[in-house]
Image: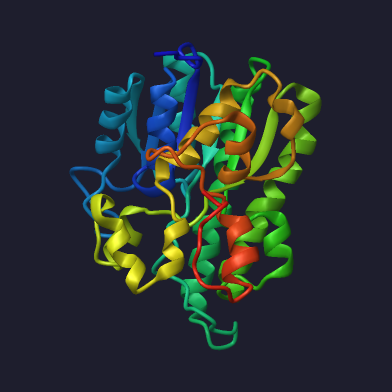
Amino acid sequence: MSQPLKDKVALVAGATRGAGRGIAVELGAAGATVYVTGRSTRGRRSEYDRPETIEDTADLVTEAGGQGIAVPTDHLDPAQVRVLVDRMAEEQGRLDVLVNDIWGGEKLFAWDSPVWEHDLDKGLRLLRLAVETHAITSHHALPLLLRHPGGLVVEMTDGTAEYNRDNYRTSFFYDLAKASVLRMAFSLGHELGPRGATAVALTPGWLRSEMMLEAFGVREDNWRDALERVPHFAISETPRYVGRAVAALAADPDVARWNGESLSGGQLAQVYGFTDLDGSRPDAWRYLVEVQDAGKPADTTGYR
């Protein structure tokens, strides 16, 4: 198996579950050494109180062909992030890929709740988890990434810049968080480009994360059972799909062509030729505009 990232070192910040886990595993499959961070460990759960742990993610990275290293880290604590980066510098001497996937907001936002009705403490906590963590991590990690030319920063968000510009996303706080991360990638591209590195924003499509599958009462092996209740779920994708998008970007010697841009996994699949685990190429954001938002019946023909 080709391992184009065999000598590369990655940090996936927020790799406990969902897209972060899928990205970490695919970077491992490409041969990378991957530091995976989060607050949920085998010894202690975060406020999510879910079974997924960073140790499990690290094991999956290693099983895929890379080296997974789990480091419990609260990315709201600058001291912990500094210790993490110092450890990577000591152990590896380099950082080639930084994925800012920290989120933690599922239980903090209320759908279609205006700012004056939304719980303020939860909204501000969401912004801290979704925005402040990314800034803290970049502040401490980017000097290490810039030691060698060709580094890549991936800011994970929900929605492309074009889609989020034209659509209200769930609530004031959710909308602001996702827009902020998109702008972070643009700003980092401005700062990193002249220094030999690249920054992009990347969104998955409708993600079949552990929490999403559980919410629909299905598993990955029978996820289509949810289509009777939620027909447009047919366009959904595994977390490994966006993981393959990150691995493709990290292995691209011409990745600087994307600097500062907003990208989607489905868009990159058309460029790099990777597929989801089932061999399909779901293009969720085009589907969302042309089919779901347009009020048409669910039909993924031509979209996966």
Position in image of residue 144 (x %, y %): 59, 23
| Residue pictured at 45% horizontal, 63% vertical | 105
Q: Nearer the viewer, residue 94 or 29?
A: 29
| Residue pictured at 46% horizontal, 40% vertical | 241
| Residue pictured at 64% horizontal, 17% vertical | 147
Left or right: residue 226 versus residue 154 is: left
Left or right: residue 258 versus residue 170 is: right
Residue 31 is drawn in which quadrant?
A: top left
Quadrant location of the N terminus in the rendered image: top left
Position in image of residue 74 (x %, y %): 40, 46
Residue 254 is drawn in which quadrant?
A: top right
Left or right: residue 119 versus residue 214 is: right
Identity of the residue furthest to the left in this view: 43
Q: Is residue 293 above or below residue 214?
A: below
Q: Is residue 132 above or below residue 168?
A: above
Q: Is residue 79 visible?
A: no
Coloration mode: rainbow
Position in image of residue 12 (x %, y %): 46, 36
Q: Nearer the viewer, residue 277 or 174?
A: 277
Numbered label tally: 0
Q: Is residue 128 visible?
A: yes
Q: Nearer the viewer, residue 40 or 267?
A: 267
Position in image of residue 124 (x %, y %): 53, 69
| Residue pictured at 26% horizontal, 44% vertical | 53
Q: Is residue 179 above or below residue 262?
A: below
